[in-house]
């Protein structure tokens, strides 16, 4: 259970979503700041804050579910041992990535930064490819029919209002 410790989770959060949502946007903002979305506007600030707050909630709720239900972490080197299909995962297959994407979009709006917005799009494309060709085939092998049924009934990116009901 040491791999599922608080400090292991913290390390993985700093390494993965921390790099994606803090380090890279900071570098883009510092070095590519002249590229703005629009003239400064209060609505961008408010929308940015709302997106970041929603993203942080999605991210940390997903991490909690990975730990409590899946008995693992968000890191691919310490994945969940059990299939997580409850809570947020009963509405969408990748709420953690959606959370990170919301944070990135919120940062782009808040800082009025096209470069961070482009990074958000690149992040989404990279993850779409990764999930399609690496993550989902691995989950199919690991969890078999349970994952195939879940995958057939729950969207990868667009949350549904009706939660998935496991047949088993």
Image: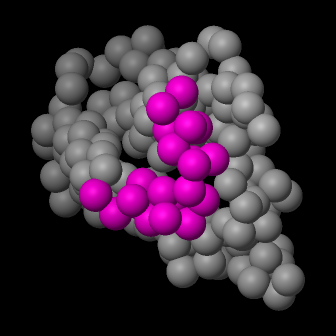
In this view, 28 is above or below 14: above
Q: Position of residue 66 (x, y in %)?
A: 72, 57
- Left/right of residue 155 with respect to residue 73 in the rendered view: left
Quadrant hosting residue 73 = bottom right
Q: Position of residue 131 (x, y in %)?
A: 36, 53
Res 8 seen here = yes
In this view, 80 is above or below 3: above
Res 18 seen here = no
Q: Residue at x 30, y 31 (%)?
A: 112
Q: Residue at x 60, y 59 (%)?
A: 143
Q: Nearer the viewer, residue 52 or 67?
A: 67
Q: Residue at x 79, y 67 (%)?
A: 71
Q: Nearer the viewer, residue 88 or 61?
A: 88
Q: Residue at x 65, y 38 (%)?
A: 89
Task: Give the magenta part as a residue range.
Answer: 133-153
In this view, 11 is above or below 157: below
């Amino acid at each position: 259970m040491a791999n599922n410790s608080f400090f292991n989770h913290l390390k993985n959060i700093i390494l993965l979503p921390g790099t994606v949502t803090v380090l890279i946007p900071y570098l883009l903002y510092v070095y590519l700041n002249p590229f703005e979305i629009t003239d400064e506007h209060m609505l961008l600030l408010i929308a940015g804050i709302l997106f970041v707050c929603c993203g942080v909630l999605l991210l940390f709720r997903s991490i909690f579910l990975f730990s409590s239900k899946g008995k693992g972490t968000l890191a691919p080197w310490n994945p969940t041992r059990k299939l997580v299909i409850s809570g947020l995962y009963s509405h969408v297959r990748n709420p953690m990535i959606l959370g990170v994407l919301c944070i990135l979009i919120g940062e782009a709006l808040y800082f009025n930064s096209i470069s961070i917005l482009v990074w958000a799009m690149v992040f989404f494309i990279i993850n779409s490819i990764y999930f399609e060709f690496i993550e989902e085939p691995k989950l199919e092998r690991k969890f078999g029919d349970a994952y195939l049924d879940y995958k057939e009934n729950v969207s990868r990116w667009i949350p549904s209002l009706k939660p998935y009901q496991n047949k088993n």
